[in-house]
Amino acid sequence: MNPSCTAFLALVRKDIAIFLRDRRALVVNVLTPIVVAAFFGFLFGGSGSPDTVSGMPVGIVDLDGSALSKAVVADLAQDQALKTESMPEDRAQQLVKTGKLRAAIVLPAGFGAAAPGALFGRGDKPRVTLVYDPSQSMVRPVVAGLFTQHVMQQLSRALNPGSGMSVPFALANIAASTGPRYNSYAHSFAGMSVQFILFMGIDAGITLLLMREQGMWRRLRAAPLSRGVLLGSRLAATTLIAMLILAVVYLVARIVFGVHIAGSALGFAMVAFAFALLAATTGLMIAALGRSVGATRGVAMFSVLILVMLGGAWVPAFLFPEWLQHASTLAPTRWAVDGLDAMTWRGLPLSAALAPTAVLFGWAVLFALIAVWRFDWEGD
């Protein structure tokens, strides 16, 4: 075997062996993303089973007590999207303020008498108050829409008691994905894997930076080893470690949380490998551009957190403002998360993995070129 190839493989084996012997690294890089992903997945709906969906807690204050208001309150209580509780107005407002209720609906006195006439423009409209938690502003339009629906249903029945009028359509709710039922654990495992593997890449880069500061690179350069062998071995070892972490994390996700690769297995492997390579080249670039261990670690961690946030790893990107959704496509983390999502719960074919893989490879090549260009072999 070629001596350079033998040295390359020896350096790769050495780096992987060091990682596996470091129990702290194993815990941080394998167990942590599993725990955090499990928490986020549970927080955003778990496996998506209808039996596990809990209604939004909403307080109901009926200051009217009319037949119409009582019928609306009864309808709201039967709505599976809500978990209503009747209570006094001051208690409802206090529970919303303390975050124990998402919202509260206050039906004013005279609501039942005024609403039918107001429907046809006769008389003033009764003022219904919707108190909501400002930290969950998306709840407001949902609750308002459901309340409006039930009021209109009851008004139509009251005005046409013999006809039994109601909303003139039946709404069929269809979860649009080509894969299995939506599993929020699939998205959270994608996001947390991306985050913590990038952290691992940072650690690999910091280790290289520390080796350079200690003069170890100069001693290695004294051996008959080229720059390609030295940097390439680090790149290969970090990529393999990242792939190992992904494999273990997704194995746990499959066994414990029911996360399936519902799309193309080959496509999943392509996205996973491209992202692992990106994490490895990120570490090399950090080592090349960094000047001191402390300052470099801080800047690198901050940069990765921004990229992870923009990539939709913490919350799905569709919750972003429209301009930010477009801007986030510039972040490689967005392509990594979307690519892993496409191959898991979305159940998309191999073609859907091509663009994420290409973009991740492109960023990895750019980072590698920067690392080779700026790496300081003589630093001390």
Image (cartoon, rainbow, N blue to C red):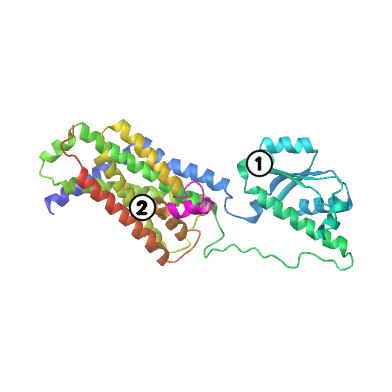
Lateral position of residue 326 relative to residue 364, left or right: right
For this view, does 86 lie left or right of residue 284?
right
Tell me the amino acid under the disc marked 1: Asp
| Closer mark to the observer between disc 1 and disc 2 | 1
Which quadrant is the C terminus positioned in? top left
Please tell me how crowded label 2 is: few (under 14), some (14-19), or many (20+) other residues with Cα within 10 Å: many
The structure residue drawn at horizontal position 10% and vertical position 44%, both measured from the top left corner, is 224
Query: Is any part of residue 79 visible from this angle?
Result: no
First to last magenta residue range:
311-327
**Residue 50, percent across and down?**
65, 56
* Residue 285 lies in quadrant: top left
Check disc 1 and report its element: helix, strand or loop: loop
* Relative depth, front residue between 43 and 359: 359
Q: Is residue 288 magenta?
A: no
The N terminus: image quadrant:
bottom left
Q: Is 88 located above or below residue 373 in the figure? A: above
Q: Mark 2 points at which residue?
A: 275
Mark 2 lies on a secondary structure that is helix
Q: Do the residues labelled 1 and 2 touch (CB within 8 Å)?
A: no
Say if the magenta span includes residue 318.
Answer: yes
| Mark 1 closeness class: few <14, some 14–19, many ≥20 residues within 10 Å | many
Q: What residue type is labelled 2?
A: Phe
| Residue tagged 1 | 133
* Residue 176 visible in this rendered orientation of the protein: yes
At which x and y percent is residue 303? Answer: 38, 41
Q: Distance between the residues labelled 1 and 2?
A: 39 Å
Classify residue 84 as left or right of residue 225.
Answer: right
Residue at 87% in and 62% down:
159
* Residue at left offset 66%, top offset 38%: 99
Task: Work out whether 380 lies above or below 318.
Answer: above
